[in-house]
Image (spheres, rainbow, N blue to C red):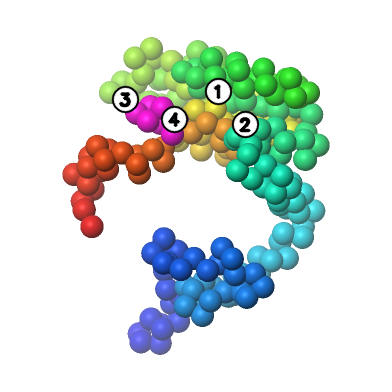
């Protein structure tokens, strides 16, 4: 049992690191105290994967956008320039109907940038809750369910080159990305309380207090 415990990797907890030397470590490399040393095999095994053509294309596009737009470009600008770097011609927007106005503006901006845009709202098809197995207790007030799988499959048929999620509910966004054949990334992350800015909770004394009451302190 003792041998087994010694061979079990320690849980990685980068969040408690006070040094973060990895940020400026190159070419110094990984510090001796870094918990990543428990996963040297993983780190070595994953390096060649970045050289695979599909991964290399995405990774290089990311590096270019990061280098050129760092601290200057908004998420929308990054999305446009990233799509250009990948050579994408047709962009998909999976939009929550609650953010349809924002979706309209995002579509306008992508079109101005030269892209063909496919926009599919979340309640496409007017599918009843009961058809997707949602019990009456958890049904939407309108009894029309969000339809993220259909959103993805429609974009698959449209052969979009990249898809962006615009405010789909947590869970619906996961289903959309699961079924999307094209690369998919969030453009807007829904947070009804914090105006679609989830990280704002970290800067609000009121909301941090509520979190402490609900999940504990310390």
Residue with the mark numbered 2: 76
Given residues 145 and 195, the one toward you in this image is 195
Q: Secondary structure at mark 3?
A: helix
Residues in magenta?
Answer: 190-197
Dot in front, 3 or 2: 2
Q: Is residue 158 visible?
A: no
Given residues 176 and 211, the one toward you in this image is 211
- In 3D space, how far apart are the residues under numbered discs 4 and 2 (Cα atoms)? 14 Å
Dot in front, 3 or 4: 4
Q: Secondary structure at mark 2?
A: helix
Residue with the mark numbered 3: 138
Screen quadrant of the C terminus: bottom left
Q: Is residue 190 visible?
A: yes
Going from N to C along the chain, the mark reached first, 2 or 1, is 2
Compared to residue 182, the image places residue 11 above or below, namely below
Residue positioned 51% across, 80% down in the render: 32
- In 3D space, how far apart are the residues under numbered discs 2 and 1 (Cα atoms)? 14 Å
Compared to residue 71, the image places residue 127 above or below, namely above
Going from N to C along the chain, the mark reached first, 3 or 1, is 1
């Amino acid at each position: 049992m003792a041998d087994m415990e010694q061979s079990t990797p320690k849980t990685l907890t980068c969040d408690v690191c006070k040094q973060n030397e990895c940020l400026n470590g190159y070419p110094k490399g990984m510090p001796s105290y870094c918990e990543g040393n428990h996963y040297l095999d993983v780190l070595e095994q994953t390096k060649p994967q970045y050289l695979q053509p599909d991964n290399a294309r995405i990774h290089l596009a990311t590096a270019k956008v990061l280098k050129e737009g760092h601290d200057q470009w908004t998420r929308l600008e990054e999305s446009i320039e990233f799509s250009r770097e990948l050579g994408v011609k047709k962009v998909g927007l999976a939009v929550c109907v609650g953010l349809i106005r924002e979706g309209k503006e995002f579509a306008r901006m992508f079109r101005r940038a030269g892209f063909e845009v496919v926009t599919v709202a979340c309640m496409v098809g007017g599918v009843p809750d009961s058809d997707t197995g949602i019990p009456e207790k958890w049904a939407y007030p309108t009894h029309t369910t969000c339809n993220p799988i259909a959103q993805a499959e429609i974009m698959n048929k449209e052969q979009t080159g990249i898809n962006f999620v615009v405010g789909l509910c947590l869970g619906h966004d996961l289903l959309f990305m699961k079924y999307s054949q094209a690369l998919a990334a969030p453009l807007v992350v829904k947070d009804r309380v914090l105006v679609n800015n989830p990280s704002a909770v970290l800067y609000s004394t009121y909301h941090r207090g509520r979190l402490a009451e609900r999940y504990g302190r310390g």
